[in-house]
Image: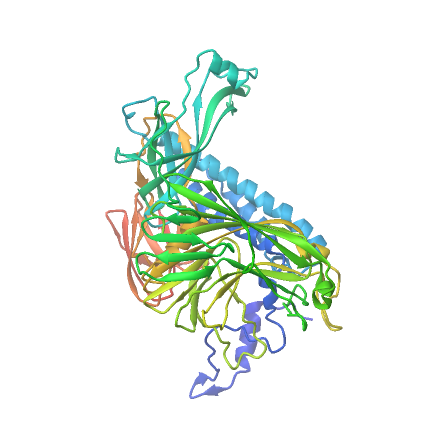
Amino acid sequence: MVHSSLPQFVEAVRAEIPCKEGRQDLPVVTGELRTDRDRMVLAGTLSARIDLKQENWRSQTLLEKWAEPFSVWAWLAGSADPHAALRYAWKLLLQNQTQNAICGSSIDEVYDEMMPRFRQVQQIAEELTERSLGFLVERIHTGPEPPGGPAAALVAFNPLPFRRRECIEAVVEFPLGPPRRMPVAPEVDLAEGGPDVSEVQVVDPAGAIIPVQVLENRLATRRILSGNDLPHLQSVRRMRILFAGEDLPACGYATFHILPAGVQPPPMQTLSPSLHALENASLRVDIAPNGSLHVIDKDTGREYGGILVFEDGGDAGDLYHYVQPVQDRVFTTLGSAPRISLVEDGPVRSTYCIEHTLMLPENLKARTAGDGHTMPCRITSYIALCIDSQRVEVTTVVENQACDHRLRVLFPTGAHTDLSRAEGPFDVLKRPAALPAEWIGGSPCRPQHSFVDVSDGQRGIAILNQGLPEYEVKRDVDRTIALTLLRCVGRLSDGDDAPGIDPTPGAQCLGRHVFRYALMPHAGSWEAARIWEQAHAFNAPIRPVQTDQADGDLPANASFVEIRPAHLVLSAIKRAEDEDALVLRFYNITNANAAGEVILHFPIRAAYRANLNEEKAQPLDVNDGRRIRVPVRGKEIVTLLLYR
């Protein structure tokens, strides 16, 4: 018996391949390998145990976008290196990414052990992020206090490699009294004459006062930690506010100032100009009596109707495969009469709440037999539109009490095309709605990362998501995008020769689920609209950190790194595994070759191209110690090693 290795296996295969004209004669296969002749693609795993996919997305996003890169930026500014903690978090996450684990195609006990691992990963990533951002804000020169103080400084961090214009939600606190050892009710400090704040103004980095919306305003007690003393408690006025930040630096931060604004509230403005409507400069959304949306893209004049209809059908399959019942009954919200209410209104964001109740068959037997046994499935959606935003954001809360079914949300596109584009690993994949003829047994449900787009080249609509990896473009007249929210089944697998027929009651996904997604109409193609930027921004909101006015050595507004042109997408910023260097990885999301340029806002002495294993290839010229030019082929992944 020989315990072989993968390189040995490859060499053994090569030795058996016949040569033709001095070259090994091998067929060339292109495109996605998703034919399912022997049912080995297992397409149903994309949506099995959807909460696993959401927790995996949350964990990866925290590590890739926050903990890892900002620990590097903090380390460059003088902080300790948390490399060991990051490595431990990644190893924990990889334990959850084995095939049958992340696919959800395991018994319930495996699922039960995965969720604590995800929580550990997120705890580590959040703690490292909080420490890194806290270290950076202490080093930032927040600038002179604007007139009208005292002010609180708010540093807004952007993890993405492009400048952003985003609505920023922040919690700010104004002290009402001194820190104390023993707790005192905030009302006591307030009664003793502590300075109170009822309204605020936000001053942007350019010194302009910008619109702000107070979402919550209450008295609270905060804990103050010290490295050399016991914790203290302090009464505060705690406000949750929302404001629009413009021109936020790429992979960097901007400093805003929050000032008391007296007791008189500003004149009321709204993004809901009429009943059951939302509108800003780019979009208008009207909510129909059945809860569906009619969306107008004001830039193109194109209208999209019947958006946000929920569709529920039976599932006779298992954790590996979706199987439509022979006698299925499909339920939708088309004929629904939901409760519609305006729950948030202001100059920065307005939000409507749409509350449906679908009476669904209790299980597969009740669905196919039509025996009347039903369970209420409450579907509550919050439709939000921000000032200047190009996307409509949706949060859907589902209270699932039914078994053996699949719940999807529908987006008719009206596009005259048979193609969709969906983000995948280091790529955007072009797919026809109809499966290729050679795909025997292939599933019409396809994988995605953060978006799917259907466009005819002149205009289109993209659906962005947070941790929802399955979609289908239906072959109906409207080329409807169906986004899977839940797929609920009760067994591991079916068939006598299957890996197991173990019952999996946990995979019925009973209980409360929260889903976040967004729709973005646009002109032109997905490349012209830079859909990936909107999708990545939706997945990585700006993080604000409150700090005192400080006189640090970092500028008030800065970018740590910029990557040009825009279709070069940042993938990783990290410490190298085996040497004292930084790894910067990005990829070309389009087919077009690019003259890439990396602009660093810290000096380096050398740069090299490397492979994915962080092994040096060729050296690169570094101009002024900060600029690196890199030619990049279409779809190419580029890894750079940077030496300080």
Residue 335 screen position, x and y as percent: 56, 60
- The colouring scheme, among rainbow, by chain, secondary structure or one colour, is rainbow
Q: Residue at x 47, y 36 (%)?
A: 130
Give the residue at the far left of this rendering.
624
* Left or right position of 591 against 382: left
Residue 630 visible? The answer is yes
Residue 508 screen position, x and y as percent: 68, 57
Q: Quadrant of residue 150?
A: top left
Q: Is residue 606 above or below residue 195?
A: below
Exactly how many numbered labels are in the figure?
0
Q: Residue at x 68, y 56 (%)?
A: 402
Q: Quadrant of the N terminus?
A: bottom right
Residue 105 screen position, x and y as percent: 66, 61
* Left or right position of 186 against 299: right
Give the residue at the far top of this rendering.
192
396 or 573: nearer the viewer: 396
Residue 450 screen position, x and y as percent: 46, 57
257 or 73: nearer the viewer: 257
Q: Quadrant of the C terminus?
A: top left
* Left or right position of 488 against 545: right
Q: Residue at x 72, y 53 (%)?
A: 109
Q: Is residue 613 above or below residue 347?
A: below
305 or 176: nearer the viewer: 305
Residue 639 visible? The answer is no
Q: Is residue 273 above or below residue 201?
A: below
Give the residue at the far bottom of this rendering.
21
